[in-house]
Image (spheres, rainbow, N blue to C red):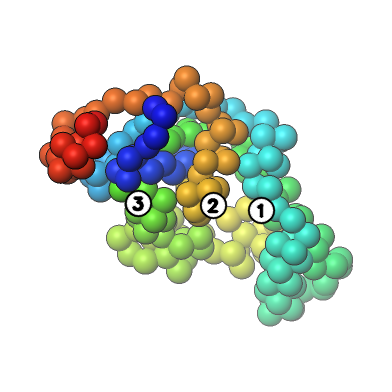
Protein backbone atom coordinates (compact mmCIF):
# COMPACT_ATOMS: atom_id res chain seq x y z
CA UNK A 1 0.00 0.00 0.00
CA UNK A 2 1.69 3.22 -1.13
CA UNK A 3 -0.76 5.71 0.36
CA UNK A 4 -3.39 4.95 2.96
CA UNK A 5 -6.80 6.58 2.73
CA UNK A 6 -8.49 8.37 5.68
CA UNK A 7 -10.32 5.17 6.67
CA UNK A 8 -6.99 3.33 6.82
CA UNK A 9 -5.50 5.08 9.86
CA UNK A 10 -3.78 2.55 12.09
CA UNK A 11 -3.44 2.09 15.85
CA UNK A 12 -1.45 -0.47 17.81
CA UNK A 13 -3.18 -2.34 20.61
CA UNK A 14 -1.42 -4.72 23.00
CA UNK A 15 -3.63 -6.98 25.06
CA UNK A 16 -1.52 -7.27 28.18
CA UNK A 17 -0.84 -10.32 30.30
CA UNK A 18 -3.89 -9.82 32.55
CA UNK A 19 -6.19 -9.71 29.50
CA UNK A 20 -4.64 -12.94 28.22
CA UNK A 21 -4.64 -14.69 31.60
CA UNK A 22 -8.25 -13.69 32.32
CA UNK A 23 -9.42 -15.01 28.92
CA UNK A 24 -10.69 -11.58 27.83
CA UNK A 25 -8.96 -11.54 24.44
CA UNK A 26 -12.02 -12.42 22.36
CA UNK A 27 -14.31 -10.11 24.31
CA UNK A 28 -11.95 -7.15 23.92
CA UNK A 29 -11.36 -7.72 20.20
CA UNK A 30 -15.12 -7.91 19.73
CA UNK A 31 -15.53 -4.42 21.23
CA UNK A 32 -13.20 -2.92 18.65
CA UNK A 33 -14.72 -4.82 15.74
CA UNK A 34 -18.23 -3.74 16.74
CA UNK A 35 -17.03 -0.11 16.56
CA UNK A 36 -16.12 -0.68 12.92
CA UNK A 37 -12.36 -1.13 13.21
CA UNK A 38 -10.65 -3.74 11.04
CA UNK A 39 -7.86 -6.07 12.14
CA UNK A 40 -4.89 -5.43 9.83
CA UNK A 41 -2.46 -7.60 11.83
CA UNK A 42 -2.65 -9.88 14.87
CA UNK A 43 -0.27 -12.21 16.69
CA UNK A 44 0.57 -13.59 20.13
CA UNK A 45 4.12 -12.81 21.23
CA UNK A 46 6.33 -13.17 24.30
CA UNK A 47 7.88 -9.69 24.62
CA UNK A 48 11.55 -9.20 25.41
CA UNK A 49 12.78 -6.66 27.94
CA UNK A 50 14.52 -4.64 25.21
CA UNK A 51 11.43 -4.64 23.02
CA UNK A 52 9.40 -3.21 25.89
CA UNK A 53 12.01 -0.57 26.74
CA UNK A 54 12.06 0.49 23.08
CA UNK A 55 8.27 0.47 23.05
CA UNK A 56 7.74 2.71 26.09
CA UNK A 57 10.59 5.04 25.06
CA UNK A 58 10.38 7.40 28.07
CA UNK A 59 12.70 10.31 28.90
CA UNK A 60 13.87 11.84 32.19
CA UNK A 61 11.14 14.50 32.15
CA UNK A 62 8.49 11.76 32.02
CA UNK A 63 10.20 9.73 34.76
CA UNK A 64 10.42 12.77 37.03
CA UNK A 65 6.82 13.87 36.47
CA UNK A 66 5.45 10.39 37.10
CA UNK A 67 7.78 9.91 40.07
CA UNK A 68 6.51 13.10 41.69
CA UNK A 69 3.00 11.68 41.51
CA UNK A 70 4.16 8.48 43.21
CA UNK A 71 5.86 10.48 45.96
CA UNK A 72 2.56 12.25 46.66
CA UNK A 73 0.76 8.87 46.81
CA UNK A 74 3.36 7.50 49.23
CA UNK A 75 3.03 10.55 51.47
CA UNK A 76 -0.75 10.17 51.49
CA UNK A 77 -0.30 6.53 52.56
CA UNK A 78 2.06 7.59 55.38
CA UNK A 79 4.98 5.72 53.85
CA UNK A 80 8.64 6.74 53.79
CA UNK A 81 10.17 8.40 50.74
CA UNK A 82 13.33 6.42 50.05
CA UNK A 83 14.58 7.80 46.74
CA UNK A 84 14.34 10.65 44.27
CA UNK A 85 11.19 11.07 42.16
CA UNK A 86 13.03 10.16 38.94
CA UNK A 87 13.87 6.73 40.37
CA UNK A 88 10.25 6.11 41.32
CA UNK A 89 9.37 7.08 37.75
CA UNK A 90 11.87 4.57 36.38
CA UNK A 91 10.34 1.97 38.67
CA UNK A 92 7.09 2.36 36.70
CA UNK A 93 8.75 1.02 33.55
CA UNK A 94 10.63 -1.64 35.52
CA UNK A 95 7.37 -2.94 36.96
CA UNK A 96 5.66 -2.71 33.56
CA UNK A 97 8.44 -4.81 31.99
CA UNK A 98 8.03 -7.38 34.78
CA UNK A 99 4.26 -7.39 34.28
CA UNK A 100 4.43 -7.58 30.48
CA UNK A 101 6.82 -10.55 30.51
CA UNK A 102 4.71 -12.73 32.84
CA UNK A 103 2.98 -14.37 29.87
CA UNK A 104 2.43 -13.74 26.15
CA UNK A 105 0.62 -10.63 24.98
CA UNK A 106 -1.57 -10.23 21.90
CA UNK A 107 -0.42 -7.53 19.50
CA UNK A 108 -2.99 -6.10 17.08
CA UNK A 109 -3.03 -3.40 14.42
CA UNK A 110 -6.50 -1.92 14.08
CA UNK A 111 -7.44 0.16 11.06
CA UNK A 112 -10.28 2.61 10.44
CA UNK A 113 -11.35 6.25 10.38
CA UNK A 114 -9.77 8.01 13.35
CA UNK A 115 -8.50 4.65 14.61
CA UNK A 116 -6.22 6.13 17.29
CA UNK A 117 -8.94 8.30 18.84
CA UNK A 118 -11.56 5.56 18.46
CA UNK A 119 -9.37 3.00 20.22
CA UNK A 120 -8.54 5.48 23.00
CA UNK A 121 -12.21 6.25 23.68
CA UNK A 122 -13.11 2.56 23.62
CA UNK A 123 -10.30 1.59 26.02
CA UNK A 124 -10.93 4.34 28.60
CA UNK A 125 -8.53 6.24 30.87
CA UNK A 126 -5.27 4.65 32.01
CA UNK A 127 -6.43 4.06 35.58
CA UNK A 128 -9.22 1.47 35.58
CA UNK A 129 -10.68 2.68 38.89
CA UNK A 130 -11.53 6.05 37.31
CA UNK A 131 -12.27 4.86 33.76
CA UNK A 132 -15.81 5.50 32.53
CA UNK A 133 -18.39 2.73 32.63
CA UNK A 134 -18.83 1.49 29.07
CA UNK A 135 -15.10 1.53 28.31
CA UNK A 136 -13.05 -1.66 28.33
CA UNK A 137 -11.03 -0.69 31.40
CA UNK A 138 -14.09 0.68 33.16
CA UNK A 139 -16.06 -2.52 32.55
CA UNK A 140 -13.48 -5.27 33.06
CA UNK A 141 -11.12 -4.22 35.85
CA UNK A 142 -10.95 -2.05 38.99
CA UNK A 143 -7.22 -1.59 39.66
CA UNK A 144 -5.83 1.80 40.72
CA UNK A 145 -2.50 3.64 40.66
CA UNK A 146 -2.38 3.91 44.45
CA UNK A 147 -3.05 0.19 44.97
CA UNK A 148 -0.40 -0.71 42.39
CA UNK A 149 2.09 1.62 44.11
CA UNK A 150 1.27 0.09 47.50
CA UNK A 151 1.99 -3.39 46.12
CA UNK A 152 5.05 -2.23 44.11
CA UNK A 153 3.70 -3.43 40.77
CA UNK A 154 2.35 -2.12 37.49
CA UNK A 155 -1.28 -1.10 37.33
CA UNK A 156 -3.14 -3.97 35.65
CA UNK A 157 -5.19 -2.17 33.03
CA UNK A 158 -5.53 -4.85 30.34
CA UNK A 159 -4.45 -2.85 27.28
CA UNK A 160 -1.84 -0.59 25.75
CA UNK A 161 -3.02 1.65 22.92
CA UNK A 162 -1.18 4.21 20.79
CA UNK A 163 -1.73 7.80 21.90
CA UNK A 164 -1.18 9.47 18.52
CA UNK A 165 -0.91 8.60 14.84
CA UNK A 166 2.84 9.23 14.97
CA UNK A 167 3.24 7.03 18.02
CA UNK A 168 1.22 4.29 16.33
CA UNK A 169 3.51 4.29 13.31
CA UNK A 170 6.61 4.03 15.54
CA UNK A 171 5.13 1.31 17.75
CA UNK A 172 3.76 -0.84 14.93
CA UNK A 173 7.28 -1.16 13.50
CA UNK A 174 8.48 -2.56 16.84
CA UNK A 175 5.91 -5.35 16.87
CA UNK A 176 5.24 -6.19 13.22
CA UNK A 177 7.20 -6.58 10.02
CA UNK A 178 5.54 -4.85 7.07
CA UNK A 179 4.70 -8.20 5.46
CA UNK A 180 2.68 -9.15 8.56
CA UNK A 181 0.26 -6.24 8.03
CA UNK A 182 -2.50 -7.14 5.60
CA UNK A 183 -4.22 -4.92 3.05
CA UNK A 184 -7.71 -6.21 2.30
CA UNK A 185 -11.28 -4.90 2.19
CA UNK A 186 -14.01 -6.19 4.50
CA UNK A 187 -17.74 -6.25 3.80
CA UNK A 188 -18.10 -3.75 6.66
CA UNK A 189 -15.73 -1.33 4.92
CA UNK A 190 -17.71 -1.59 1.69
CA UNK A 191 -20.79 -0.41 3.57
CA UNK A 192 -19.20 2.18 5.91
CA UNK A 193 -16.78 3.78 3.44
CA UNK A 194 -18.58 3.28 0.12
CA UNK A 195 -18.29 6.93 -0.92
CA UNK A 196 -14.56 7.00 -0.16
CA UNK A 197 -13.93 3.85 -2.19
CA UNK A 198 -15.90 5.15 -5.15
CA UNK A 199 -13.96 8.40 -5.14
CA UNK A 200 -10.53 6.96 -4.36
CA UNK A 201 -10.66 3.73 -6.30
CA UNK A 202 -10.26 1.48 -3.26
Labels 2 and 3: the sequence-earlier one: 3
Helix, strand or loop under label 1? loop
Question: Residue 30 placed where, x, y %?
Answer: 28, 40
Residue at the location (52% across, 36% down)?
172
Mark closer to the chain start, 1 or 3: 3
Residue appearing at x 51%, y 63% in the figure: 127
Would you say 34 lies left or right of 81 here? left
Between label 1 and label 3, give the one nearer the viewer.
3
Q: Is mark 2 on a helix, strand or loop?
A: loop
Tell me the distance, in whole angstroms, between the alpha carbons under discs 2 and 3. Answer: 26 Å
Q: How crowded is mark 3: few (under 14 residues within 10 Å), some or many (20 or more)?
A: some
Residue 26 location, quadrant: top left
Is residue 31 at all visible to an observer of this figure? Answer: no
What residue is shown at x 53% (from left), y 48% (from top)?
Answer: 166
Residue indicated by mark 1: 153
Q: Name the residue under label 3.
A: 114
Name the secondary structure under disc 3.
loop
Residue linked to disc 2: 156
Q: Residue furthest right?
A: 83
Q: Position of residue 20 (x, y in %)?
A: 46, 36
Q: In which quarter of the image is residue 66?
A: bottom right
Measured from the top left, where is residue 90 in percent x and y? 76, 55
Q: Where is residue 162 in the image (x, y as percent from the top left)?
A: 50, 49
Residue 46 placement, left or right of 117: right
- Do we see residue 180 in this rendering? yes
* CA–CA distance in space, label 1 to label 3: 33 Å
Q: In this view, does 193 lie above or below 92?
A: above
**Image quarter hosting the C terminus:** top left
- Asked if the residues shown at circle 2 and circle 1 are in contact, with their CB atoms under 8 angstroms apart, the answer is yes
Q: Is residue 158 left or right of residue 30?
A: right
How many C-alpha atoms fall within 10 Å of the one at disc 2: few (<14), some, or many (≥20)? many
Amino acid sequence: MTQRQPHQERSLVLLKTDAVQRSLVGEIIKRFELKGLKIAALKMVMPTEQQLLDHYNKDDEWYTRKGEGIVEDLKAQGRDIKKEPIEYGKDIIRTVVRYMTESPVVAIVFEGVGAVATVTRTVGSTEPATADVGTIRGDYTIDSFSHATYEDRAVKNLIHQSESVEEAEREIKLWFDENEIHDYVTAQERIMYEAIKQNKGV
